[in-house]
Amino acid sequence: MAASAKVLDGGWGWAIVVASFMAQLLAYGSPQSVGVLYPEWLHAFQESKGMTAWVGSLVAGVGLIASPVCSACVDNFGARPVTIFSGVMVAGGLMLSAFAPNVQFLIFSYGIVVGLGCGLVYAATLTITCQYFDKRRGLALGIVTTGTSIGAFIYATAQNELIVLYGLDGCLLIIGAVALNIMACSGFMRPLNMPAYYLKQKAALERNTEEQLFEKPPLEDLKITAGSTANTPEKSLTVKELLITIDAKDIQTEKKTGRPLAGLAIMKAIKKRQQAYCKYMHSMYEILQDQAMVAFCIAVFLFSLGAFPPVLFIEDVAQSEGLIEEISVIPLVSIGAIATCVGKLALGILVDIRWINGIYLYAFTMFAAGVALLLIPLTKSYMGLQILSAVLGFFSGNWSLTSYITTKIVGLDRLTQAHGILMFFGGFGIMLGPPVVGWFFDWTQSYDLAFYFSGSCVVLGSFILFLLTLPCWNRKHSENDRPDVQYTSNCDKVASVA
């Protein structure tokens, strides 16, 4: 296998981009356009709108909340096996949903199973793309992440036509069969390193074949990387190879002293796990001590709480108000999805301009989206809903700014942990938003109060983010604050994982 430095920013990496784009399109197409299915489920199961809304909220929120687990799976098993498994989960969940006898079963099959599968696809595609790109990582990730929006645009229309031709059950079976192609996309995800290397070596030690490892050269002479086959003195050991070498030495010492092989190793492993856990929790505590980071988490939670429900309810709003009898050829969900795709690209370009502050730009997009939400109850024409769907979709593209802003707040070294915390807040808001809106409708038999609540949450979040990140908060402690991190052009191009 060639060294990783020779295959970065080109070559097979573009095949990875295409495969990852298609995997996200196939996985997120139906969940992102779930608003087309929502009226059909209401009619089929005759449940309350609050209960039925849990299906759409879980499929969007479970993957975000479980993102740390999904990332750990990719790190341990690699992008290709995880993508294959996620393809089975997404396709299986969609097909199971065709046989759902009630909403509770649908919450499990569509909300949880498909949601976890989407989370695994998301983590795998972004990880493998980052491995293959360095200087062009921003462009590559930007192309990959637009797969969700384009998938929503295509699937919204496709699911509408399939429901007319084959019914709701036939539609779910067909898109579930199409989702099996996610496993075909995994075939292109050739790994640059061996994520299961450490596990294989540990298994070999347990089978009493560890003497083969003892023939390795001394630690100071072992200078290889996970992606190379030749000795390169200028490079150092990877973490996994270092652990293998240390464990091999420990076991050899235990054999010489006659002590049990497992006892000391288990105690050391437990101690290392405890130390790593304490260090991780302390790092999270330090991240949450940053006022700007806390304000950003609150803003993302309020934005997710208020801005996601229109994706699920906007078609039902049009039908409830009598503005349209059936879903149109180009549904409102499709209009919002394509506008989100344009918004991601446009806002990503704007944030690269030096004189534009990314945090304030995000606050402005939140304010504009909140105003659009507040105008939905006042709109009495289908054309007006189309315009508001486009506006709301465009400013919902501010998810492309989350990684950039997080990096500016906490630095590149803590980006992974901080972004995981941020996505947890976002996923929690997405899970709560649609049921809350549904409960408001069940209570008042109107969407007006629900969207006033949603719009107020988003506007409130924009003001919180703007006020808590003003420069005046840092004047008293400017001497103790860490110096601003200067980022190179490569770091500034880090694209969103949203």
Image (cartoon, helix red, strand yellow):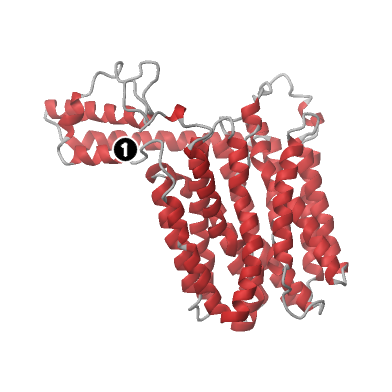
Q: Secondary structure at mark 1?
A: helix
Residue 465 visible to the viewer: no
How packed mark 1 is, by other alpha carbons closer than 10 Å (few <14, some 14-19, many 20 or more), is some
Q: Position of residue 165 (x, y in %)?
A: 59, 80
Q: Position of residue 28 (x, y in %)?
A: 57, 59
Label tally: 1
Q: Nearer the viewer, residue 60 or 294?
A: 60
Q: Is residue 363 left or right of residue 35?
A: right
Residue 186 visible to the viewer: yes
Q: Residue at x 63, y 63 (%)?
A: 154
Is residue 59 shown above or below 131?
below
Q: Position of residue 331 (x, y in %)?
A: 72, 68
Is residue 491 shown above or below 160?
above
Q: Quadrant of residue 374?
A: bottom right
Q: Position of residue 93 (x, y in %)?
A: 47, 67
- Which residue is under mark 1? 197
Q: Quadrant of residue 158?
A: bottom right
Q: Nearer the viewer, residue 46 or 17?
A: 17
Q: Nearer the viewer, residue 183 or 257?
A: 183
For the N terminus, the quadrant is top left
Q: Identity of the amino acid at label 1?
A: Tyr
Q: Residue at x 38, y 45 (%)?
A: 77
Q: Residue at x 17, y 29 (%)?
A: 254
